[in-house]
Structure formats: structure tokens, C-alpha cells
Amino acid sequence: MNKELKKILSCDRFLSAISEKIEANERITLLEGLELYQSHNLPALALLANEKRKRINGNFVFFNKNFHLEPTNICVHNCKFCSYRRNINDADAWDYSINEMLEICKKHYTEDISEIHIVGGVHPNHDLDFYCNLVAEIRQLFPAIHIKAFTAVELDYMIKNSNLTFYEGLLKLKKAGLNSIPGGGAEIFDSKVRAQICHHKSSTNTWLEIHETAHQLGITSNASMLFGHIETYFHRLNHLETLRKLQDKTHGFNAFIPLKYKQLNNSISEIGEINDIDVLKNFAVSRIFLDNILHIKSYWPMLGKNLARFALHFGADDMDGTIDDSTKIYSMAGSEEQNPSMTTDEMVKFIKDAGFTPVERDSLYNKLNVFE
Ligand code: V47
Ligand code: SF4
């Protein structure tokens, strides 16, 4: 532990105790996590989270070259925080055919792209075969690309509609070319909060079962948490503890993505958005608490570039990707990044300017290029 950190922490017995736990590679408890959230000592939280991130990821900050595909914004669900979903007959609804989606892929693909990220609404009429065909066609077009596709909520609907078990459905998708699954749909695991913000969609147990089954099949995944709406610090910690337990069992999560609730044009807009201090605190507590999920993503299309860069000093070690202006979920919810896109040079400079070593990675965090 460096001297600077020891000095700052010496006047706070609780934070000193946490720093000793970090030094000893010991886990913090849910109650300690709660106390961290309640602390107003932001510099100390940053130093503690940074100490933890250094032990896991050194001075590296990862990114990849990717683009998104959003097959449809038509959705059978109606989550109160969602600014993106539309009804089937709405003028601004979209529902691409497989050929249209392949054209979109060709438009964004270049040889150095390593990942396609596919997330959309839960369309009432598209079944598992439709999505298996999509994955198989993409696999044929780009044999080496990593296909990270479909949140557990989309998977739940398409697999149940095909009368298959999650194991059978995921195996079919894997055979078609699926490599991993994204972290969305987790929202907040507490059932009462879930009942208030997204009562009809996949339950916490279903989300966990799908990820656990994927891990058994060698399909790794990410995990997210939608925070900054009606949940409390306790709900966030309960969420983190649930993820930590599943990760102890399967080791299948690659990254954790804290998603800040954005307020524009959804049915709980009046809640407003939490302040940047609480966002940064959330990164710090997540980094310190989730000792077994190696990467914490600072998802810049949602946070905005400036806040995303601050988060790197609060434990985050991954900037997600270059995106190429291919996602609408966050611009429709009011993100300042209305056309999210970064070149590799911009990403490298962005990370270096924050004092870290940029690393281009693949989707499983193998290092492809280290920019010393
Ligand atoms: O589950 C929807 C979130 C998620 C809003 O795995 C909102 O690398 C904030 O899966 N404000 C889907 N968030 C996105 C997703 C994802 C995103 C980034 C990286 C990865 C990954 C996966 O988007 C949903 C929901 O939690 N969301 N509306 C909103 N108004
Ligand atoms: Fe549908 Fe996803 Fe929006 Fe919920 S968050 S309404 S599941 S698109």
C-alpha cells in the first residue's frame, strides 16, 4: 500500500480496515460495501478502487474494435426506464430482415473489427430459428468475428417460444456461431424493485439460470446493473453479491457493466438522473466488491466520454469499443453521445491522457496490441 494512501486513510478507521483487506486480497462483506457507499470521502474511495484495479489489471485500460447491430426496437415488454422500445405499428419502429442486417454488418465491418454486439427489443414474431439464421449468416460472412449477442431477456423469449430448454436453445445458437452473451436485462435483481420498473419481463432467477447455463456450455457472458433510479444502495449490493456468488460457481463472467439510468423520453423521467459523484462511487464500490469479475466496463456511449474517463480512476479498466455510430439505445435515452464513434487513435489518446496504458483486446480480453 503506498504512503499517500496510508496517510489519507489514517484518519478513518473504517477505510483503513478496507485498505488492509484489499492489501490482503480479502473480500469485503455486503455491510462493508454499504458503508463504502455511504462514505463521502471520494478521494479515498478512488484510491482504494484504484489499488484494487492495479492488483487485477495493472495500469492497463482495455478497448476493442466493435460495432453494434440492433435488429428491432419493437418489444413485447414495456420497461418503465426504456426510451427505445416501440409498438409494432409506431412510425419510428424498425424491424430489419436478415438481408438488411447483413447489409448493415457489411457497412460497418473492416478487417480489424473483432466483435459484433447484437442487442435489440423482444420482437413478438421472431423465433429462435430466425436468430440462429442471423448468427449463421454473420458467421459465414465474417468467419473470425466474435459474435456477442442477445440479452438473457431476448434469449428467454426466443428459446421458450421454441419449446426448448435453455440448454438446448443456447446449444443451437452456439452451433450457429454465437460466442458470448451481453450483460443486459439484469437491471436490479431485487424482486420488489423489478416489479416496479420491469414487472413483466424475465425474472432474476431466469436471468441467472440463462447465464449459468451459457457458462456450462462454454459461452461466456457479461453482467450489468441498471442503477440510479428507484433502487437503494442495499439493492445494488444485493445485486453485486448475487453476481459474485454465481461467478464463484462458474467463472463465466468476463466483465461487469454499471449502466447509469438515463431519463429522456421514458415513463419514469420525473425521477431525474443521479449526480456524477454517485456514479463514480458506484464504480469504486463495484470494483472493490466484485473481486472475482476481472473487468469493469466504463461504457462511454451511455456515460459520455468525460465521465467515462473519470471512472477509470474509480476502478474501471475497460472502455468497451469504438462502436462506429451503430447503437441508438443510449442516444434515445438522452446520452450526450448522440452519434457514438471513436477511432482507434482517439481511443488510444483518450486513455493515455488519463494516465493509463491502452490495450486493444479481443472479446475474451486477450491482448492484441499494447500501446506503450
Ligand atoms: O438491459 C435501457 C439498459 C440494457 C436505459 O455486455 C438503459 O458489453 C440506461 O445489454 N438508461 C441493454 N440504461 C444494453 C446491454 C449492454 C450495454 C453495454 C454493454 C454490454 C455488454 C451490454 O440497456 C438494458 C437496460 O439495462 N437500458 N434503457 C436507460 N434509459
Ligand atoms: Fe424491451 Fe429491453 Fe426496452 Fe425492456 S429494456 S422494453 S426488454 S427493449
Image: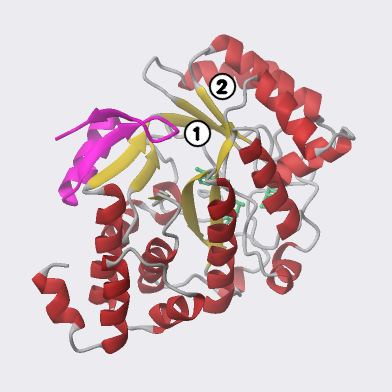
Of residues 90 and 273, the one drawn nearer to the viewer in this rendering: 273
Looking at the image, residue 77 sits to the left or right of residue 58; the answer is right
Q: Residue 153: horizontal and vertical position, in percent? A: 72, 47
Dot 2 lies on which element?
helix
Q: Which residue is mark 1?
A: 326
Residue drawn at point x = 52 percent, y = 13 percent: 142
Horizontal and vertical percent for residue 233? Answer: 52, 77
Disc 1 and disc 2 in contact, CB within 8 angstroms: yes
Q: Amino acid at mark 2?
A: Ile
Residue that protrudes farthest toward the right in the picture: 163
Picture quadrant where residue 51 is located:
bottom left
- Looking at the image, is 124 positioned above or below residue 113? below
The span shown in magenta is 343-372
Q: Is mark 1 within 8 Å of ligand 1?
A: no
Q: Can you identify the residue that label 2 sits on?
A: 104
Question: Would you say residue 344 sits in the magenta stretch?
Answer: yes
Residue 311 placement (x, y as % from top left): 32, 59
Q: Is residue 13 magenta?
A: no
- Horizontally, residue 113 falls left or right of residue 131, namely left
The structure residue drawn at horizontal position 76% and vertical position 35%, both measured from the top left corner, is 167
Q: Residues within 10 Å of mark 2 (few under 14, many from 20)?
A: some
In this rendering, is residue 236 above or below 356? below
The answer to which of 237 and 336 lies nearer the viewer is 237
Amino acid at pointer 1:
Ser
Task: Indicate left or right for 6 with 129 as reference.
Answer: left
Q: CA distance from mark 1 to mark 2?
A: 9 Å
| Nearest the eye: 16 or 93 | 16
